[in-house]
Image (cartoon, grey):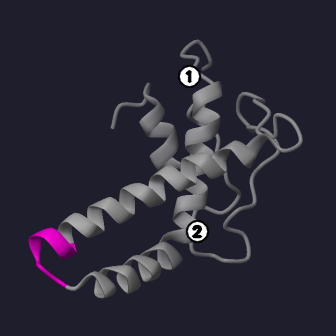
Amino acid sequence: MLKDTKLYSILNNKCPKCHKGDFFIDTHAYNLKTFIKMHDHCYHCGELFNKEVGFYYGAMYVSYGLNIAYGVGLFLLMVLLLKLNVSIFLFSFLGLVIVLFPLTMRISRLIYINIFVSYDKTIK
């Protein structure tokens, strides 16, 4: 995967500025005790991850968009392609959102910080 892209930082749990330091303390999204704990700053470049109090409230909007994308994709698959009942879709969607919650929360935070912090290729 291209290291100079924001997608690299998002999918690999890396610092958005240097792409070397880890963003979250635990690399596994499904360790429910530590799935949302982040480092205060990047150990490689020193980028501050907690910009200000309440900074990650904006990540809720990203999470909402991701959940809408899950719902639309599942709807297209289940109702339009497989011709299943809408109630089956609703229960499946609820299950999908619950199962993907830790992953969605981490990805939405990574997407959100990548909106504001750009990759700096001069950092070695």
- Residue 13 position, x and y percent, is 56, 49
**Which of the two residues, 65 or 7, is positioned nearer the viewer here?**
65
In front of the other: label 1 or label 2? 2
Amino acid carrying mark 2 in the image:
Pro
- Residue that sits furthest to the top in the current view: 122
Q: Is residue 106 above or below residue 17?
A: below
Q: Is residue 94 above or below residue 109?
A: below
Amino acid carrying mark 1 in the image:
Tyr
| Count of numbered badges drawn on the protein | 2
- Residue 18 position, x and y percent, is 60, 28
Quarter-wise, where is residue 27 in the image? bottom right
Q: Can residue 17 be seen here? A: no
User: The C terminus appears in which quarter of the rendering?
Assistant: top right
Residue at the spot of label 2: 102
**Which of the two residues, 73 or 47, is positioned nearer the viewer here?**
73
Rate crowding at label 2 as few (under 14), some (14 to 19) or many (20 or more) other CA atoms within 10 Å: some
- Residue 15 position, x and y percent, is 62, 37
Residue at the spot of label 1: 119
- Residue 65 position, x and y percent, is 48, 50
Q: Is residue 81 magenta?
A: yes
Which residue is depicted at the point 44% across and 38% down? 8
Kindly state the secondary structure of the residue where label 2 is placed.
helix
Stretch of the chain drawn in magenta: 78-84
Which residue is depicted at the point 48% across and 73% down? 97
